[in-house]
Image (cartoon, grey):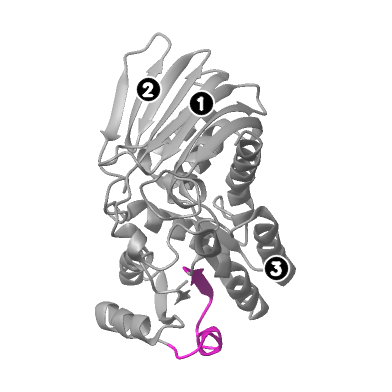
Amino acid sequence: MTIGVGLVGLGMAIKPHMLSLRELESAGRVGIVGGFAPSAARREAFAGQWKAPVFATQEDLLGAHGLDLVLVLTPPGAHLPVAQAAAAAGKHILVEKPVEVTVARGEALVAAADNAKVRCGVMLQHRFRPAALKLKAALEAGELGQILSASASIRWWRGANYFKQSGRGMKARDGGGVLITQAIHTLDLLLHLAGPHKDIAGFAFTSPLRAIDTEDVAAAAIRFRSGAIGALDATTVAQPGYPERIDIAGTKGSAVLETFQLTINREGRDTEVAGSAQSGGGGADPMAFDHGPHRAAIVEVLDAIEQNREPSNSARSGLHVQRLIEDWLRDAATRS
């Protein structure tokens, strides 16, 4: 089955999606119908770089012959109206992270897809990194026993060039700072591995390094519904940027996941190391990462469409991390 794919939003996020779609097109899984952005300059740049059709309006794209799935790659605050229009047109949806700028708007997006009976996924691709998949399988098999401690550290850097784009780092455009824009991927993966949170005690502030109105330094203590506890650390002021890391300790062993590398110690067995701690986009170039996990996340949505089931990276599942972030910032606001 070849699934027709269109893209709304043709900015910085386009590269890993188009690299993935080109490979899937070559494999016969998808057909690229075309893209749309309100900016004529972006439409022209997209058509020139990717040799793909563009549409003058969103309505033209949604009405195009053969369109089945819409990738929503706009700024987060525009996800809801685009997804609602796509759902109303009977198209399946894959939104970039976060699902929307707030949990309430994210829930409205999920509801629109549910009401239209279309599939809706979210691009939280860290779940599909090979080392993360291996750790998830080990945890589900009980190889580390009951999780007692689960922590995450995201010490990244974003330089002046990153913040040159109008609205970057501002609530009006991005909906939040380091937590919802950068750390969300690792935080989502932590919850994907250890389960949803129960409560959180957090701190957050804005550094003097850039003129933004969102947090770029944050830390918290977390308690999971399972009873496990942990520490969270997230920032974009750690020049030049370091690999993000998840640490999990259980009753039968422990594991460290550092970008694409997993080190796992099981009780009574030798240490196992899989993958490599390559760059995950934590430095000055936020797009310096392998697009393979993006491709895997897209494939999961394609499979879900074909098999008439909810994808494992459903937008609904992506709201867990947004609830965590909202609780974190709400608690931090009481301590400022």
Q: Position of residue 322 (x, y in %)?
A: 60, 48
Q: Nearer the viewer, residue 260 or 324?
A: 324
Residue 275 in view of the camera: yes
Cα–Cα gap, marks 1 and 3:
35 Å
Marked residue nearer the N-terminal end (3 or 2): 3
The amino acid sitting under disc 2 is Ile
Q: Label 2 crowding class (10 Å Cα cut-off): few <14, some 14-19, many 20+?
A: many
Q: Which mark is residue 180?
A: none
The residue labelled by disc 1 is 231
Q: Label 1 crowding class (10 Å Cα cut-off): few <14, some 14-19, many 20+?
A: some
4 shown above or below 16: below
Label 1 residue SS = strand
Cα–Cα gap, marks 1 and 2:
19 Å
The residue labelled by disc 2 is 264
Q: Are marks 3 and 2 in contact (CB under 8 Å)?
A: no
The amino acid sitting under disc 3 is Ala
